[in-house]
Image (spheres, rainbow, N blue to C red):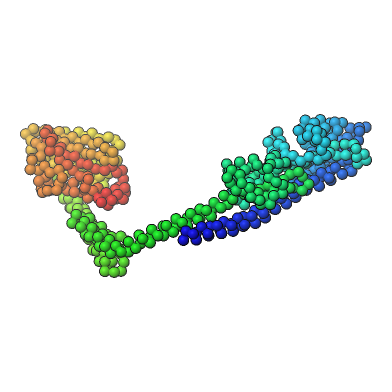
Amino acid sequence: MGIYTVISYNQAAEILRNQTIVNADQAFDEAVNGVHHITEYMDQTLNSVSLNKGINTILSKNEYSTLYQQIADYFYIENTLQEYESNRFSLRLELYMKDAFEQTSDNVNTFTYYSARQENWYQIMEREGLNTYWFNEQNVKNGVKYLSVSRKIWDLNNLNRQVGIIKIKIEEEMVLSILENSIIHQDSQVFLEHSPGHILLRAGILTPDIDKAASFLGKIEPEQSWEPYTYDNQQMLVNQASIRGTPWNLTTIVPMNSVLKNITALNQQMLWSMLIIAVIGYVMALYTANLTTLRITKLIQRMKGLPEGRFLSIQGYHGRDEVGELIDNYNYMIEQIQRLMKDKFEAGKALKHAELRTLQAQINPHFLYNTLDVINIMAAEHGVSEISHTVKQLTTYYKLGLNKGRDMVSLKDELKHVEAYIEIQNIRFEHSFNLSIDVPESLLSCMLPKLTLQPIIENAVIHGILESSIPEGQITIKVYAEGDTYFIQVTDTGPGFKPASLNTSFQQDQEHLNGFGMVNVHERICLTYGDTYGLEVDASYADGARVTLKLPIYKDEDSISSNQFSSKT
């Protein structure tokens, strides 16, 4: 298999090399023709301007009799040059004339010999005695680069007399786009050279190897046709052609290592693929042999978790054999158990809500009767405004307690409910209870189940302060937050809880606590928020009784409903 891969690689490499040469040759020929088309058009424009009789006649004049005639000649030259500039290559024409035309030169299309003498290209033409000169230049003002050609204009009536110079230039970007279109590979390079080693333009992304290759352009033999060159241990294919009518050459370099990179990577992938296939075959054989044992082992592990309360199903496809059927039946059993547990939970929830409704319908009848009795006695004995005050507190108490049938109230309303309850009890027992509330304003908007505090305060009044030997008592409510949880701490100066009633976890006999109300409060909190929240009795508190409620911070009832089930699980 390895020998076959090597042979296949060599054959594919040769095919890819030949195909690369074919594609590169086609692109290279298009680039050569494109550049030649531009230079040929520039040369034709040079000829047209040099041989234009009107321009030649004007340039041949030695002097002007009137300024009017000089201006007329200027407009003729200007219009003629602009006509030549109106072409698809966007050529720019510059005509250099004798200094006598200084008054009509605009330094846009027409210039004087004095301006030309300052330019490097003119100095080269004069020094080397050139009639035509191809070069590149850059506009000093705007930084635009051009490829240019200049030619001397001779008097048509005296070919030994020079009367001007015409220069035509084209932006390098137009020629560069032709070179970029000829690149067939991302590591290829195309160079436009003025002479060996003198690069006018180059296209392509230079890699370090290509940068080094560019330095030996001057060593390449002229008119090469995809000949291999080795430079810096890298094989390259080189093609070169001259641009007719100019001294320029177009050279392209294609590094073979980059061309063959993909097929080399493919060859390595094939070797790795064969290794992976062998490994996969071995693993699949091992998996097939142990499939039945593995499924049975997984089933046993799941069944061992049932006594511990882990009712987990087995996911995935289990097959159609006897083991698969056994797993499907096990999953069905787990699904039924989970459904029954959920139904039981919902039933318990409904039961607690029913108990709450019952509690609301029977809000301590004895308290109601005693309060009404107080109202009647005060009405008979005093006939003063205290009766109105008592009735107002009673109205507030029941209005906040019923809460229009809603299950959740704000902490602010729950505290008002407690204040109304204490106010009524103070009227009944001659101001025997002093209520102190310490709560941050930021927590007043927290939501909690209604009738959460009243049973605890009632327990502090009836089973706490009223059972003590001191006629007056203090009840303190303190609220504070820790992270996303807040605590409501209720203390009183009564005798405290008896040892038999201390049960902070509420997992034993619920009747050990004083009254149905506190147990109900704890269970409603656990049902609403989960077992991590609820009511705790401080067994170490020696100055009376202290009960602490632990609740999550929710500012609206909708957020409680959306998080209710997830909090319990």
In depth, the one of 344 and 77 nearer the eye is: 77
Q: In this view, does 116 lie to the left or right of 539?
A: right
Using the image as rendered, state which of residue 78 and residue 111 is in the foreground: 111
Query: Position of 291 compared to 2: left or right?
Result: left
Q: Residue at point 82% right, 36% down? A: 129
Question: x, y (%) of residue 53?
Answer: 89, 43
What residue is at 81 percent from the left and 42 percent from the top? Answer: 81
> Which of the 4 image quadrants contains residue 171?
top right
- From this view, report whether residue 257 is shown above or below residue 73: below
Q: Which residue is at a point 88% across and 39% down the rendered structure image?
A: 154
Q: Would residue 395 be seen by someone viewing this image from the given angle?
A: no
Farthest-out residue, bottom = 321
Q: Nearer the viewer, residue 80 or 139?
A: 139
Q: Residue at x 30, y 49 (%)?
A: 563
Residue 539: image location, x then y, percent: 12, 38
* Extreme-left residue of the structure: 469
In x, y percent, where is residue 446?
28, 41
Does residue 501 appear to the left or right of 209 in the view shown?
Answer: left
The answer to whether residue 490 is visible is yes
Residue 455 in percent (x, y) is at: 16, 44
Residue 505, quarter of the rendered image: top left
Left or right, residue 326 beside residue 182: left
